[in-house]
Image (cartoon, rainbow, N blue to C red):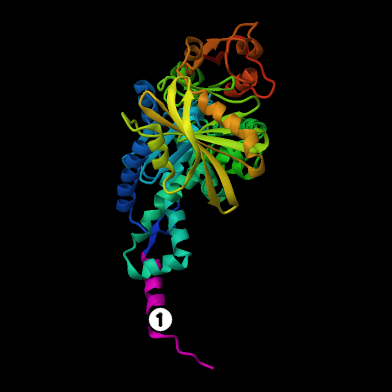
Amino acid sequence: MTMNTPKRYRSIATLTAVLLLAGCATNPVTGDRDFVLMSEQQELALGSQYHEQLMEQQYDAYDDPELQKYTERLGQELARESHRPDIDYTFTVVDSPQVNAFALPGGYIYMTRGIMAYFNSEAEFAGVLGHELGHVTARHSVRQQSAATASSFLGNILLATTDAGAGAGNLFQTVQLAAIRGYGREHELEADRLGAEYLARTGYDPEEMLGVVRILADQEDYERRRAGAEGREPSGYHGLFSTHPDNDARLQEVIRAANKYAADDPRPSGREAYLERIDGMTYGPSASQGAVVDGEFLHLELDAALGAPAEWTIDNQPQRLLFRAPDDVAALQVTLGKADTGTAPRRLLEQRIGDAELERGRRFDANGLAGYTGVVQARTKQGPQILRHTVVIKDGQPWFFVATSKDNAEFDRFDERFLDIAGSLDSLTDAQRKAAQPLRIKVVRADANTSYSGLARDVKGVDDAANRLRLLNGDWPDGEPGEGELVKTLVR
């Protein structure tokens, strides 16, 4: 039996097919035809837009002009050897303790100071720069977003009714997700291959990248163990460097394929030059991010301290502070409101909870700071939930506390702990101010008596300091410094 397809569906199908063909572009790396939904000009324009958005809303550039110049110089040297040398690349070290590196389309590449702390040579640093360059030159973000859009029913409608660049709106979300999870095994392997090639073309031994794999795999393994013990999500570099061991056969294959580009006499790895460059770099939270020291949250710029109940953990996140009871049976979140010069605490709290009814409301004092507190009966997907809301005003800025327990029947058992945390808000003592000073990397030369346990004795307020120093120096789990070697330690 023959059935006639309605004309409107034939038209959409035909137009979709035409646009799919029109969306093909030559891959700068392979020379093959790739399906993409935007031109290179659109990619460059969006990259510039997203770069401004990222640096205004999420990150600050790390305040070290010499380190920024060094990163830019090395990045540009690699970019000149890439498959897209004509792009106007920008390389930025961002002020984040997270161990990560990522790229935006159009040539914007970012290194956190957190990941830079773990490199032990210029070649290792160049290897990760090259990996991120590979994501840009192969247009991974554009290809991934284009494939996701075209595979959906909505994507087909977009293709049939708008211009080929219409799907670009979700590109930033694609890039943000890739910065956390990566681009998938095949794209990450391709970025590894390209990074090794750019490393070799710049004169370094491409197999230096295997050293990066070992370092970051160790860091990720250690971070996973620490996060599990502390009841939080681990953080780490998204690329294959951290998720696949250095004995991964395919990874070794793609890296060693770059040997055909290697110089007969490779340039030195640049260990001492790199370590001298990061000497003095901030490690962990900066003064503007606050620090967790011995069960207290200390913030220099806000001149503020908060204490946690015994056995509770403190998770210092970019936009909030989270106090967690053992086994996550109760939690309290802290956020800051906009500075206010005269609104009463009760009014601030009422504005915060909106239409919800505040019960058991009363004035609240935290070390002489004015506040207000009360309970709200909230409805959630999990059912009714009791929330303790508190606001405390310090130096004209509201601190908002919202807390709950996993079992409403036991809310009163934790309620005093919630109020204890809010009531602990205070200015820093001289001892707390000293303890809150950011950690910095200090590079020293080891002698015959240098050991990580010995160095760790001088690292104050850091749990498991000896093993952290081993990780920083690529000697985890049981290595020791060699006599005469430069070694990274930590000081306040």
Residue closest to the eye, 192 or 411: 411
The residue that disc 1 covers is 10
Asked which secondary structure carries label 1, the reply is: helix
Inspect this view and state whether residue 206 appears: yes
Left or right of 222: which side holds 369? left
x, y percentage for residue 74?
40, 29
Q: Residue extending furthest bottom? A: 1
Report the span colored magenta: 1-22
Q: Residues within 10 Å of mark 1 (few under 14, many from 20)?
A: few
Q: Nearer the viewer, residue 182 or 420?
A: 420
- Please tell me whether residue 12 belongs to the stretch shown in magenta: yes
423 or 362: nearer the viewer: 362
Residue 121 can be seen in this image:
no
Numbered circles on residues, count: 1
- Amino acid carrying label 1: it is Arg
In this view of the protein, which residue sits in the foreground, 174 or 332? Answer: 332
Q: Is residue 344 magenta?
A: no
Residue 164 left/right relative to 324: left
- What residue is shown at x 48% (from left), y 64% (from top)? 151
Q: Quadrant of residue 12?
A: bottom left
Tell me the quarter of the picture where residue 393 sits.
top left
Report x, y in % for residue 412: 63, 36
For the stretch drawn in magenta, the main secondary structure is helix
Reply above or below: 466 against 118: above
Quarter occupied by the N terminus: bottom right
- Find residue 311 and report its horizontal and vertical position in percent: 66, 26
Left or right position of 339 against 446: left
Residue at 33% across, 48% down: 46
| 40 to 337, vertically: above or below | below
Q: Residue 252: horizontal and vertical position, in percent?
A: 61, 40
